[in-house]
Image (tube, rainbow, N blue to C red):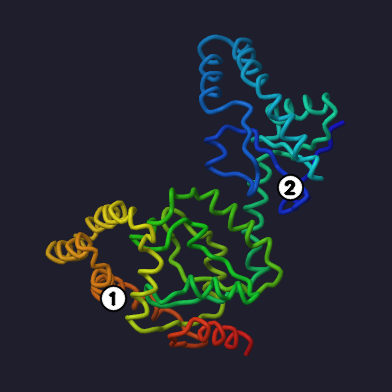
Amino acid sequence: MIEILDVKDVFNDDEIVLIDVRSEKEYLDDHICNSINMPVLTDKERHDVGYTYKNESKEEAVRKGIGYATYKIIDYYDEIDRLCSKGKKVVFYCFRGGMRSNSVAKTMDTLNKKVYLLKGGYKEYRRYVMDFIEEIPDKYKFVMLHGLTGVGKTNILKKLKEEGEEVIDLEYLARNKGSVFGKIGYDKPTTQKLFESELVYELSKLKGDRVYIESESRRVGNVNIPDKLFDTMKEGKHILIETSLENRIKIILDDYIPKDTTKLEQFNDSLNGILINLKKLLSTEKVNTLSEYIINNNYEKFVEELLVDYYDPLYRNSIKKYEYKSIINYESIEDVVKAVIKTCRI
């Protein structure tokens, strides 16, 4: 008899390894964090089975599905053997906890491999994520760090985490630095569902209820911050971070410019491609000037003028919307981190 486990019993448990047997496309759209994708049917195979079902017969589609699944049995067997030898519990799931995960689990059980099934599959897990997000206002108190572009909020969050503070990095979870150039440095964007999954996963690991987080608009890149989180962030403490223009330029250059000089040409192409979108907000002449800076690798001047002429006027109005518990002007990141922690303990 295969034991069926609830999501709450397996979520964020280091002793459990979840194997997602859905197709690659389903997995990329969203999955349980740290799960392994081992599709019973690949995207191509799933399409072929569906086509056969619609155009031939259910029986022939089932036969095809069995054929595609059969050759993967040895891979499942070897992976389970490897994981169990490390003392792990293996839990299978598909979309609803139905045919795909059941068929693999029963086959492994027949081969004397101890495995488990996730009750309700991904669909039940998705409900768990949405319920968790609804409970955010009751569980967490946020400290929002505000400041102009390049003030180093992300670096401050990293340092706070090193100091043992609870931190959520929304920009990393969104795979976007929160600006028109924000996607640079990330291989591909995330999905809304996967953003929410990773958000819940990170929140669930926190040991305290005071959480430092960077101020963001509702939309970061191509995802939206859930309403319950956004509203709770606004109701928290607010700290305004300030530093010199020179320091902001240095922070941005350290964050964006590739250390590998062979990647500069591709980096410049990305900058110019995004810069075109600013023609409606900046003059054509200004965009051409900025483009010349890129061509000549004059990144300092490019960043300086972009901050002064575009970002600073854009964000100063949003900064005025909040009342701040403290305004901290800094040059050393060690000093600002100490000041932030001290402010929140008062």
- Name the residue rendered at 58%, 76% in the picture: 160
Query: Above or below — where is 67 with respect to 297?
Result: above
- Most extreme residue toward the front, as rendered? 261
Residue on which disc 1 sits: 313
Which quarter of the image is occupied by the C terminus? bottom right
- Name the residue rendered at 54%, 14% in the picture: 52
Which residue type does callout 2 highlight?
Answer: Val
Query: Above or below — where is 334 with respect to 99?
Result: below
Q: Quadrant of residue 211?
A: bottom right
Q: Separation of disc 1 and disc 2 at Cα?
A: 47 Å
- Most extreme residue toward the bottom, as rendered? 346
Tell me if 239 is positioned left or right of 19 in this view. left
Query: Mark 1 or 2 closer to N-term?
Result: 2
Horizontal and vertical percent position of residue 287: 18, 63
Horizontal and vertical percent position of residue 209: 67, 72
Give neighbour class at mark 1: few <14, some 14-19, many 20+ (Cα, 10 Å).
few
Number of numbered discs: 2
Tell me if 333 is positioned left or right of 69 in this view. left
Horizontal and vertical percent position of residue 100: 68, 28
Query: Above or below — where is 1 with respect to 57?
Result: below
Which quarter of the image is occupied by the N terminus? top right
Q: Nearer the viewer, residue 230 or 23?
A: 23
Residue on which disc 2 sits: 7
Give neighbour class at mark 2: few <14, some 14-19, many 20+ (Cα, 10 Å).
many
Q: Quadrant of residue 50?
A: top right
Q: Secondary structure at mark 2?
A: helix
Horizontal and vertical percent position of residue 169: 53, 65
Which residue type does callout 1 highlight?
Answer: Pro
Q: Secondary structure at mark 1?
A: helix
- Name the residue rendered at 59%, 54% in the picture: 198
Q: Nearer the viewer, residue 104 or 141?
A: 104
